[in-house]
């Protein structure tokens, strides 16, 4: 029997994790990232943070959380946050958005500026980049995407741009061939996004809750999909009121399928299919388009 097994508490867990510990975690991640963890997530939180205890060699949640709060180890905050985010994503997720994006950018004059604000492991910003290439008929469209996320692990994966081939899902063979390079030898079973796509995107860490956002806009399009669901309504409202002045007057905001912003802000109105546009009657007004 291993030392770890011998040390298992009555609950069968390797580390004691009380309702009070869980409550502390919920408060900390809410303050740090705006993530409102449901009560039902106690098991998930235990298993994700137990890995942090093992990695740091700390043997109790109380001590781990005390150290975190005292700021004894700044980089642990990053690991703590990374451990608690949910990063589910896929190429061309919520597919109906991409023809709307293509139609929108085709009408624009000048370089297209897009912010993908919860980009996870990169499938979403690369899908945006592919859509732009197809809309402009070139691998080097006049466009730039800033892709941000709070989680530094997923940003590294995104910037690397290498995926198991089955991540391409139902993507057509023609599209896959045009935008991905197939790995050979040791890289067999993997694909790498073409360098031209990678060059269109800047990846950067950004916490949507932070007072300062290192992005300037104005943006033609903001993607903010499947992240607001983790935030409560006041937090959603604050973020949306900060998006509005960063958008060009005719800009589009793409939301996730289960996200409804109508009751949290009057800055945006629904255009359809979870795509929003600025409401000229709303309180938050867009900045005038920057002359380029
Ligand atoms: C479920 S994924 C959605 C990814 C992608 N937008 C999509 O729809 O496929 C949610 C992402 O939001 C990020 N996230 C959570 N809280 C955040 C915050 N406060 N600021 C920025 N990103 C955050 C997570 O790290 C995660 O990668």
Image (tube, rainbow, N blue to C red):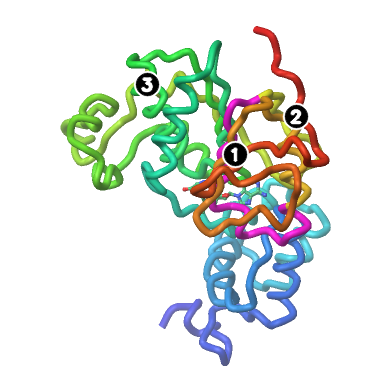
Q: Nearer the viewer, residue 20 or 67?
A: 20
Q: CA distance from mark 1 to mark 2?
A: 13 Å
- Which circle's residue, 2 or 3, is located before the other in the chain? 3
Q: Which residue position holds label 2?
A: 286
Q: Residue furthest top?
A: 292
Q: Which mark is residue 133?
A: 3
Kindly tell me whether mark 2's CB lies below 8 Å from ligand 1. no
Crowd tier of the residue under label 3, counting other residues whose Cα lies within 10 Å: few below 14, some 14–19, many 20 or above? many
Q: Secondary structure at mark 3?
A: helix
Q: Nearer the viewer, mark 2 or mark 3?
A: 2
Residue 167, image x, y percentages: 30, 46
Q: Who is closer to the viewer here, 187 or 55?
A: 187
For mark 2, give the secondary structure.
loop
Q: How many marks?
A: 3
Q: Does the magenta portion include 207?
A: no
Q: Pick whichever of labels 1 and 3 is earlier in the sequence.
A: 3
Q: Quadrant of the C terminus?
A: top right
Q: Is residue 184 visible?
A: yes
At 18% from the left and 35% from the top, the residue drawn is: 173
> Given contact means CB atoms under 8 Å apart, are the residues at marks 2 and 3 in contact?
no
**Image quarter hosting the N terminus:** bottom left
Magenta segment range? 219-236
Task: State the mark number for residue 253.
Answer: 1
Seen in the picture, residue 184 relative to 276 is either above or below; the reply is: above
Is 232 in the magenta?
yes
Query: Is residue 152 at all visible to an observer of this figure?
Result: no
Element class at badge 1: strand
């Amino acid at each position: 029997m291993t030392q770890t097994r011998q040390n298992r508490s009555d609950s069968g867990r390797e580390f004691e994790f009380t309702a009070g510990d869980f409550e502390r975690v919920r408060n900390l991640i809410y303050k740090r990232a705006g993530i409102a963890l449901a009560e039902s997530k106690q098991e998930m939180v235990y298993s994700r943070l137990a890995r942090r205890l093992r990695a740091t060699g700390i043997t109790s949640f109380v001590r781990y959380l005390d150290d975190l709060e005292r700021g004894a180890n700044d980089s642990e905050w990053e690991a703590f946050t990374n451990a608690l985010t949910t990063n589910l994503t896929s190429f061309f997720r919520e597919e109906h958005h991409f023809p709307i994006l293509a139609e929108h950018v085709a009408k624009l004059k000048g370089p297209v500026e897009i912010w993908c604000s919860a980009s996870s492991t990169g499938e979403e910003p690369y899908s945006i980049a592919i859509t732009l290439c197809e809309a402009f008929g070139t691998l080097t469209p006049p466009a730039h995407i800033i892709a941000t996320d709070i989680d530094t692990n997923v940003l590294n994966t995104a910037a690397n741009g290498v995926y198991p081939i089955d991540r391409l899902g139902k993507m057509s063979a023609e599209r896959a061939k045009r935008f991905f390079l197939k790995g050979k030898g040791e890289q067999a079973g993997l694909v790498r996004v073409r360098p031209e796509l990678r060059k269109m995107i800047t990846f950067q860490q950004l916490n949507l809750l932070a007072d300062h956002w290192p992005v300037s806009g104005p943006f033609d399009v903001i993607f903010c999909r499947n992240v607001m669901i983790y935030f409560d309504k006041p937090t959603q409202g604050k973020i949306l009121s900060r998006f509005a002045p960063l958008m060009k007057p005719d800009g589009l905001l793409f939301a996730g399928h289960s996200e409804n912003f109508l009751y949290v802000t009057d800055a945006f109105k629904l255009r359809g299919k979870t795509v929003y546009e600025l409401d000229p009657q709303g309180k938050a007004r867009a900045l005038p388009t920057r002359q380029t």
